[in-house]
Amino acid sequence: MQPGDRLIEQRLADELDLSRGPIRLGLKALAAAGLAKSEPNCGFVLAKDTRSVAAESALATFRHGDEAYAVIAADRLGDRLPANVTESELMRRYGLSRPELQRLLDRTAAEGWMERMPGYGWRFAETLSSPEAYEQSLAFRAVIEPAAIMQPGYRLSPEIIERLRQRQLRILGGELDRMSLSEVFQSGCEFHEEIMRGTDNTFFLEALKRVNSIRRLFAYRTFGDGPAMKRHVKEHLRLLDLLESERHTDAAKLMVRHLRRSPLASGG
């Protein structure tokens, strides 16, 4: 892309297989870094050449933010951070500038594991914090997710199946090695939540979303096993094949095995 090119939110969401929420957050981050700008009646446009020194500097800043993101998550799980923190405390502790911290806080708020308090305070959301609790969450999912597939009238459209399949193939084809912790987690959540949309009973989907929202940070501890993650992606593809063939009983059985196999070696 060249400076002046439009950064169209929906087009980016379609190409990256994401919802518009994280795309909007990314465009704001690019604008804050000076790489994009908002123009009246046009939305965001690219402001600088992506190969420029300014772009390289901004990308280095984003990488630093990713490192701080992972450390903050680990410190919260290890009770090294209290439930309530201030911006000045976080900047001092992690060596972040205010713009760097603001981008990080915007990201965590969008993901739902921190929320702003009055003034300059932030509160960590409720989360799972032990292997036992995490295993219980997987056991719960192993009940509701197969049950959703077995609901009368369950159907996942061919368009959704193909979109999910192409996403899994890209991950398996090398994208996994370039994904951040947050992206790996979000990809797994979106896959399983889309599967739940095949039933008209919205309680299944809402229950899964609730579990996903509180398991995020602990799940980050489990993303170090590359072979296990690739095996999980292959199981996702097999699951899609079964759903496409409307072999719902077999798909439900595979889902149980998928969620119970090596639960602490992957994010689901």
Image: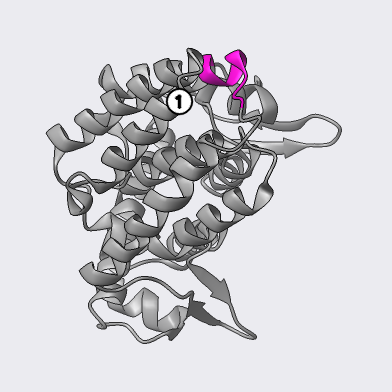
State the count of labels. 1
Reading the image, the residue beneath label 1 is: 50
Is 216 placed above or below 60 here?
A: below
Q: Is residue 46 left or right of residue 254?
A: right
Q: Is residue 110 visible?
A: yes
111 vs 167, nearest the viewer: 167
Q: Is residue 3 visible?
A: no
At x 55%, y 33%, the residue is 18
252 vs 85, nearest the viewer: 252
Give the SS element for disc 1: loop
At x 38%, y 83%, the residue is 89
* Coloration mode: one colour
Point out the stretch of residues depicted in magenta. 155-162
Q: Is residue 168 left or right of residue 151?
A: left
Q: Three-letter amino acid code at disc 1?
A: Thr
Is 103 placed above or below 169 here?
A: below
| Image quadrant occupied by the N terminus | top right
What x and y, as percent, mark residue 54? 43, 37
What x and y, as percent, mark residue 254? 32, 32
Q: Residue furthest right?
A: 41
| Image quadrant occupied by the C terminus | top left
Q: Residues within 10 Å of mark 1 (few under 14, many from 20)?
A: some
At x 64%, y 54%, the residue is 203
At x 32%, y 36%, the residue is 179
Q: Quadrant of residue 180?
A: top left
